Amino acid sequence: MMKKKYVYKWLTLSFLSFTLILFAACSENVLDLVPVTQRTLTNFYNNEAQIDAGVNGAYGLLQRQGQYGSGLIVLGEIPSDNTYSEVPANDGGNYGQLDLFSSIALNTVLDSAWTHAYRGIQQCNVILNRIPAVEMDETVKNHRRGEILFIRALSYFNLVRVFGDVPLVVHETTDVNAYFGQGRTPRAEVYRQILSDLAESVALLPQAPDRPGRVALGAALTLQGKVYLTLKRYDEAIAALNQVLPLGYVLLPDPEAVFDPANKNNQEMVFSVQFASGVNGNTEGSSAFQLFSPSGSVGGAKGHNLPTREMYQLYSQQDRRRQAYVAVRNNGVVFSRKFRQTSIDPVDGGSHVAVLRYPDVLLMLAECYNEAPNRNPTRAMEYLDMVRTRAGLTSPTTTVGQAALRDAISLERRLEFVGEGHRWFDLIRTDQAVEVMNAYFERTPGYQTIRINENHLVQPIPQSQINADPATIQNIGYN
């Protein structure tokens, strides 16, 4: 079975276009270079309503194709042993390159991931620069700042995991020349900024969102825990994640309900990017359902990010997720059920995209307790078993060794989060990516000539960025 221009060029465009664009809705087209107002940015964002429109715009940018429209999902999944691109040549071979580890600097998925992330970061920087001078309720102001700090931290976290060192821009860009020649910021410094943003966000956010789909305290703490875990700072991760436990999130009793479009923003979703069918001229929907459906199953289906047959066979017959999260067509092709058709137009999908879920909190805690200097395997198994029990699986009766428990947690993450954009980053974080993938290639027809090394743990910097600023150095191993 087969497995599977821009910071600086964009800053120039954004500086010109931001004087024309009012971020008034969370639309996929929120940053199209089409003027919808003649108000200039200099005279905008000077009252609470305008700030709220700007915050909506920052959320809207998370919907873009390079972010949670599809890009971040496939970048965290297709390079792994979880999913593959059914027809690698589809969409100009850009998804197939991720699957076959043949990515080039002209890859459009990577280009969009870079561009859309920095557009979102610029929007966050604008709001953070303008909001202190705006007269508005201080509690609301703090909540909005906390939301924007979270979005900026999330955007940089995604960038640094995909590309490694990236330019760090934390101020509103009014003169693009100020950043020309900066080059890439070491990832350690980027991570310091991410943690700084999240610490401030945690101090500002409410325990519950003030409207559906917005960021609240649990999201900031969960992301903070994930960043600490990525940096192998286990005790700090535990401290952050333990604060999420009393906030009211739960594992839904039935896995089938987790991704039911009729059950959006349920108590298991810590943070999700919002999509809706049939809204604003079908501009609020997601194309993920079409992109991630097997070829021939729906109109225009692309067959990207399909679970591998090997992945599917990891589910036991008793595992309730076997049919809730994945299914098999008559021709034997496995597909994800985490994105559902909610409209006659398969491009106008209404399934939200899960960014952080409560099982992630529990499994990260399990991993931390297993890996921390003062290891606590009992606690680790407790959190692992919570996820397994919801899936209908029995728990072991005795404590297992560290290596065996590590493997069990890794397996559970695969079963729980398949297709959501976690597996590749999990492999990198646990220093397993090269070994696991090379072993996978050896046993998988169609991939047996592929071998990867440490250079493949980051993707190539988009060529458009290098063309725009020659100070940007390409990652090793890419032309």
Image (cartoon, rainbow, N blue to C red):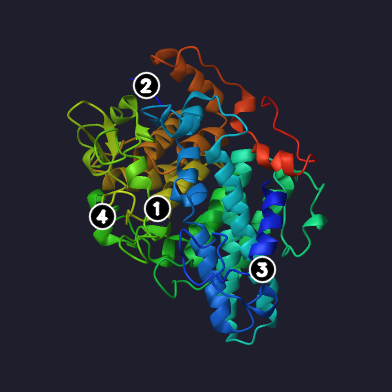
Please give left or right for residue 181 compared with residue 164 in the image: right
- Gap in Å between the C-alphas at discs 4 and 1? 14 Å
Vertically, is 54 above or below 416?
Answer: below
Asked whether the residues under the numbered discs 2 and 3 touch, taking CB atoms below 8 Å apart as contact, a structural biologist would say no
> Residue 223: x percent and y percent?
53, 55
Q: Which residue is mark 2?
A: 2
Q: Quadrant of the N terminus?
A: top left
Q: Which residue is mark 3?
A: 126
- Gap in Å between the C-alphas at discs 2 and 3? 45 Å
Q: Which residue is mark 1?
A: 353
The disc labelled 4 sits on which kind of residue?
A: Thr
- Gap in Å between the C-alphas at discs 2 and 4? 29 Å
Residue drawn at the location 22% of the way across and 40% of the way down: 323
Instruction: Specify the label residue 476 is tagged with.
Output: none
The disc labelled 3 sits on which kind of residue?
A: Val
The disc labelled 1 sits on which kind of residue?
A: Val
Disc 1 element: strand
